[in-house]
Image (spheres, rainbow, N blue to C red):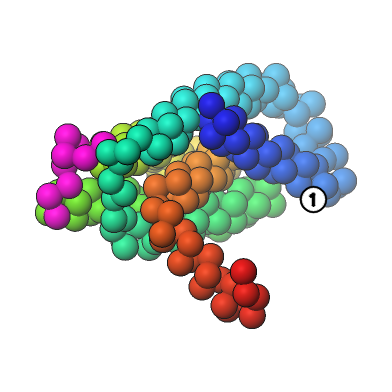
Amino acid sequence: MSVAILFALIVAGIAAWWLIASRLTGKPWEKAQSEADNEFAGAALAFAPAQVGLWMFLAVVTSLFALLVSAYGMRMEVGDWRPLAMPKILWLNTAVLALSSAAFQWTRVAARHGEAERVKGGLLASGVFAIAFVAGQLLAWQQLYASGQFLASNIASAFFFLLTGLHGLHLLGGLVVWSRSTARMWGGRAKLADIRMSIELCAVYWHYLLAVWLLLFALLLSRTTLRNLWLGICSAVGYGP
């Protein structure tokens, strides 16, 4: 269970860091404007349940992934464990997901400043990167199938399909919300103020999924790969472990 606890603590730490950073980087005039908007539009009452609901949902998802990570860590210690060679495209997929998260953050900032055109471009970019990530994950699955690694052929491959598939399903769920917000924004059926909270929640969700994927990717990499990566980093910075 120590692996699960560590996983949950890391995700919780990232969430706490995000909350603290948001408060520290908040601008007084933006806060005053937000309070004024809430006073006239009742936004505080309308949006609070959505924010609370998202964080409750993320807590449940974190518990689910923590349990699976714990099972993965314990199963690795069994003698019949055979490490799975990770498809190299996963490195590209990781970069693409990071770009999607960064694009959502850029969109979020634009929405706070009321820049509708930037929000449109940011929504489009973040969605394209996210869809590219899902496509890349499916390609990684295809490469494993082509190499003879099926769901039942190896316990390591079974865990790979389970963890990446579950993460992908959560991303697809986020894309449903993204598609609705993007369609309303580009179709002119909603003003920026109407979807600002949706953009805020999507940005938080995307940052969370990126954090989860980075932890899962590090876990799925074989110990040999991790060691070689660490040695390469040490060599690049001139430090000998």
**Amino acid type, mark 1:** Thr
Q: Is residue 121 visible?
A: no
| Residue at disc 1, secondary structure | helix
Foreground residue among 13 and 229: 229
Foreground residue among 61 and 231: 231
Foreground residue among 180 and 229: 229
Residue 11 point in image, percent of width and height: 60, 38
Residue beneath label 1, please? 25
Q: Would you say residue 218 sits in the magenta stretch?
A: no
Left/right of residue 123 with respect to residue 46 in the rendered view: left
- Tell me where residue 184 sits by quadrant: top left
Does residue 54 sit above or below 200 in this rendering? above
Left/right of residue 95 with respect to residue 163 in the rendered view: right
- Tell me where residue 51 sits by quadrant: top right
What residue appears at the point 23 percent right and 54 percent down from the top-left corner? Answer: 139
The stretch of residues the image draws in magenta is 147-155
What residue appears at the point 28 percent right and 46 percent down from the top-left corner? Answer: 82
- Main SS, magenta residues: loop
What quarter of the picture does the C terminus occupy? bottom right
What residue appears at the point 53 percent right and 65 percent down from the top-left corner? Answer: 230
Left/right of residue 33 with respect to residue 84 in the rendered view: right
Residue 62 point in image, percent of width and height: 53, 29
Residue 59 point in image, percent of width and height: 57, 25
Foreground residue among 31 and 69: 69
Q: Would you say residue 153 sits in the magenta stretch?
A: yes
Residue 84 point in image, percent of width and height: 29, 50
What residue appears at the point 62 percent right and 40 percent down from the top-left corner? Answer: 10
Q: Is residue 144 visible?
A: yes
Does residue 67 sit above or below 127 in this rendering? above
